[in-house]
Amino acid sequence: MSEKFLAGRVAVVTGGNRGIGRATALALAGAGAKVAIAGRNQEKLAETLGMLTAAGADAAAFKCDVREEDQVRKLADDVMAKFGAVHILVNNAGTAIRKNVIDFSMEEWRALTDTNITGVWLCSKYFVPHMKGRGYGRIINLTSIMAHVTSTGRGVYSATKHAVAGLTKALALELIDEKITCVAISPGFIATDLTAPLRADAAKNAALMDQTPMHRWGEPDEIASLALYICSDKAAFMTGNDVLMDGGWCAQ
């Protein structure tokens, strides 16, 4: 792949202001894409935008809550007004609540499902029409190893990620004639600010690493590198699948 193989492409990354989303936005920009990042935290958006522009990227940041249809519709309009096209959509925004299934309140259930499922659907609904007719398109949905396995306290989160895997397959088939591929990435345990409390707890960290065959945390840049490959022409025959990057967790 040439260094700037995404030159002329426009990428949208939800939850692009931190963690895996930030790493992916920087990787896409490094390959020449124009990048729009979206998120709820204005301070983190500004921080990430500063990193993108410092790297020479043509980038913009938009505050958006993917659970809200009006905000997602406006995000799509704003990105089109800024860049005039969309070629790549990375549905990365997500959240987690650790609690047994029957202990969830309705408010907690909706907080999780609205972000992890409805947000992916809404962004696809409002960005895909702008991606059609361009002869190239990539949708990348961030799922999780919990789309393949589950554990105590992760049941509802796991259900949302299974749903995203299903949406990925459906979108892949619906968009084949448009040459838009749709691929899910299922990360294992990745070292981000959201997982910092787990890593800071010596006992929990040791137990988690003991269960991970590689005995280490994954890095956001490793997930970003996979996303970059999916966006390349080398991955044009890949669609409808869910790619694990989990240090061997699901191979056990």
Image (spheres, rainbow, N blue to C red):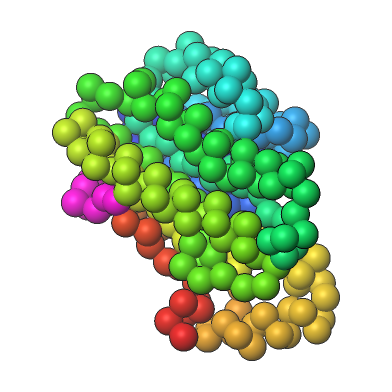
Residue drawn 60% across the image and 79% down it? 216
- On screen, residue 197 above or below 80: below
Q: Residue pushed farthest top?
A: 81
Name the residue: 50% across, 30% down: 122
Q: Residue at x 62, y 57 (%)?
A: 157
Residue 223 seen by the camera: no
Q: How many marks?
A: 0
Residue 235 falls within the magenta-colored stretch: yes
Figure check: 97 above or below 52: below
Depth check: give the residue in front, 69 or 203: 69
The residue drawn where x is 56% and y is 16% is 74
Residues 39 and 149: in front is: 149
Quick check: 4 left or right of 103? left
Q: Is residue 42 left or right of residue 160?
A: right
Q: Which residues are magenta?
A: 233-240
| Residue 233 on image: x %, y % | 23, 46
In screen coordinates, is 233 left or right of 50? left
Q: Residue furthest front?
A: 102
Question: Where's residue 142, x and y in %?
Answer: 49, 51
Q: Is residue 198 magenta?
A: no
The foreground one among 78 and 219 is 78
Q: Residue 133: x percent and y percent?
A: 23, 22
Please provide percent x and percent y for residue 167.
40, 45
- Residue 70 placement: quadrant: top right
Q: Is residue 158 visible?
A: yes
The dominant secondary structure in magenta is loop
